[in-house]
Image (cartoon, rainbow, N blue to C red):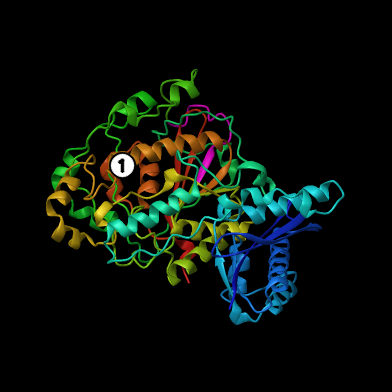
Amino acid sequence: MREVVVEADGGSRGNPGPAGYGAVVLDPATGETLAEAAEYIGVATNNVAEYKGLVAGLKAARELFPDATVHVRMDSKLVVEQMSGRWKIKHPDMKPLAAEAGRVFPAGRVRYEWIPRERNKHADRLANEAMDAGKRGRQWEPSASTAGLDASAARNAAAPAPSGPPGDATAGAARARAALAGSSGGGGTATGAATGPTAGTRAGAPAGSATGPGAWPGAVSRPATPDAADDGLFAAEEAVTASVASGDFEAEAGALAPVGHAARAHAPATDGPAARAAAPGVGADAAEGAPPAPGGAVAPPPAAGRATAPAARPEAPAAPRQGWAGPDMGAPATFVLLRHGETALTPEKRFSGSGGSDPELSAAGLRQAEAVAEALAARGTIQEIVSSPLTRCRQTAGAVAARLGLDVRIEQGLRETDFGAWEGLTFGEVRERHPEDLDAWLASPKAAPTGGGESFATVARRVAATRDRLTAAYAGRTVLLVTHVTPIKTLVRLALGAPPESLFRMELSAASISAVAYYADGNASVRLLNDTSHLRG
């Protein structure tokens, strides 16, 4: 029986607003375009446009091969989950469209898969072409379409599942790196929603401004001023710890750290780019499933500071003013830090970084993602969503994006530590197989795991550079960062100007929410840590 791939998308410039859809039928073996469909549909919502794109794609596939099996790939988590039968369809506008889609082919011959938006560029481009035509008072014409030119970039084949045991770093790293290569143009720059002509497909919120300061020392914790509270995000909330499996070894094992760990890291808190470059500010933070590093902190080289700060802020003071006294210079860039939901490795406390099998969310993790999406939708403050490129974060971000009607941008700098050959292993298994490497890694943040993983010092520099880039791009906006244990704890620690051992005194549960605000005067305010109240049944 012939199989075809249908990729579909829809968008609304206003949600609701002028809307259109696009769909493409592909040969799964060659990637050849077999048929395209697009249409301007007038004023509608994103979800209506997405469903209409699905229907058009299925009908185009049926016209070509009535007896085919169909693999539908869409970047709408809502449509994929509803058509797969995992989510209920409650909205009255969605029910007839879903029913129509279900009648095109027998249910047993259609399967659905969620894909990131950057892998759905062909359909996305078609939808934009349809909306552009509607703006001119016309309908989309196949002869004028250029969407097929972008098809090769849009159809990155899914990486094959790794072979071997959970700790097989060679197979696991191959899959993760293939996924990373397909999700970005490199250089750690955010990609996806704001790239090329496709940027206007969903315009639920304006893009972040790039006029803000380029460096944020963030070394001083300061309370929010009344003006700062106007961003409406978590200013008066307290962290609540729920009884959920966190997979976060740092908080659970922190009390077991040798006395020398605290004794060797008593550098005073500092502020300002120059001072922080010389401080022991390495991210000595183990990732999901990793135990605390009891060794002392080692000061990173000057490159660990903000290399872009002098150029980006030539007139900025060397250090922010502390406490309540200094001016906040307007609304802050606020990062809502969301740790992804559980994977199968989380409750087993296995090393799970960016060099392993790139696991998906478990059933529990999917439920957590939906719970946090509902909570964030109720708050109504998120304006942008940026995610780590790893699957568990993409899935978590996708659940929130579907609920909020926003796009997800991918940021390579938010990925978890690469744990090399330790990926998929428990701490005990690493101790058994690589005792000397483990001892070296625990003793120094500059030591890398067995097999060429990342040191904590390397990760800290990456996270700090990512923070600077994002705070500049999203000055004055509230951004959801969907990421992992190490990046979140590093951001919090740096914002507080706290010593490295503070990382091991933070609990960070799966699907928990934290928040940090960055002000234009260089101050930072930690507003929330490890909120899991939304996970309570």
Label 1 secondary element: loop
User: Based on the displayed image, in which of its 4 quarters is residue 172 positioned?
Assistant: bottom left
Magenta-colored stretch includes residue 446: no
Q: Is residue 500 something that shows in the picture?
A: yes
The residue nearer to you, when weighing 363 against 120, is 120
Say which residue appears at 61% left-offset and 35% top-offset: 209
Specify the quadrant that holds the N terminus: bottom right
The residue nearer to you, when weighing 213 against 24, is 24
Farthest residue to the left: give it.
Answer: 436
Say which residue appears at 58% left-offset and 74% top-offset: 84
Q: Name the residue under label 1.
A: 283
Q: Say few, some or many: other residues with alpha carbon within 10 Å of mark 1 (under 14 / 14 to 19 / 20 or more).
A: many
Farthest residue to the right: give it.
Answer: 137
Q: Which amino acid does label 1 sit on?
A: Gly
Residue 253 is left or right of residue 158, and the answer is left
The residue nearer to you, when weighing 156 against 227, is 156
The residue nearer to you, when weighing 102 against 499, is 102
User: Which residues are the magenta region?
Assistant: 323-335
Residue 344 is left or right of residue 186, and the answer is left
**Residue 121 x, y percent position in the rendering:** 62, 52
Say which residue appears at 40% left-offset and 60% top-offset: 510
Farthest residue to the top: give it.
Answer: 315
**Residue 294 x, y percent position in the rendering:** 18, 47
Magenta-colored stretch includes residue 333: yes
Whether 469 is drawn above or below 108: the answer is above
Dominant SS in magenta: loop
Say which residue appears at 70% left-offset and 73% top-offset: 62
Whether 185 is drawn above or below 54: the answer is above
Q: Is residue 508 something that shows in the picture?
A: no
Residue 401 is left or right of residue 453, and the answer is right
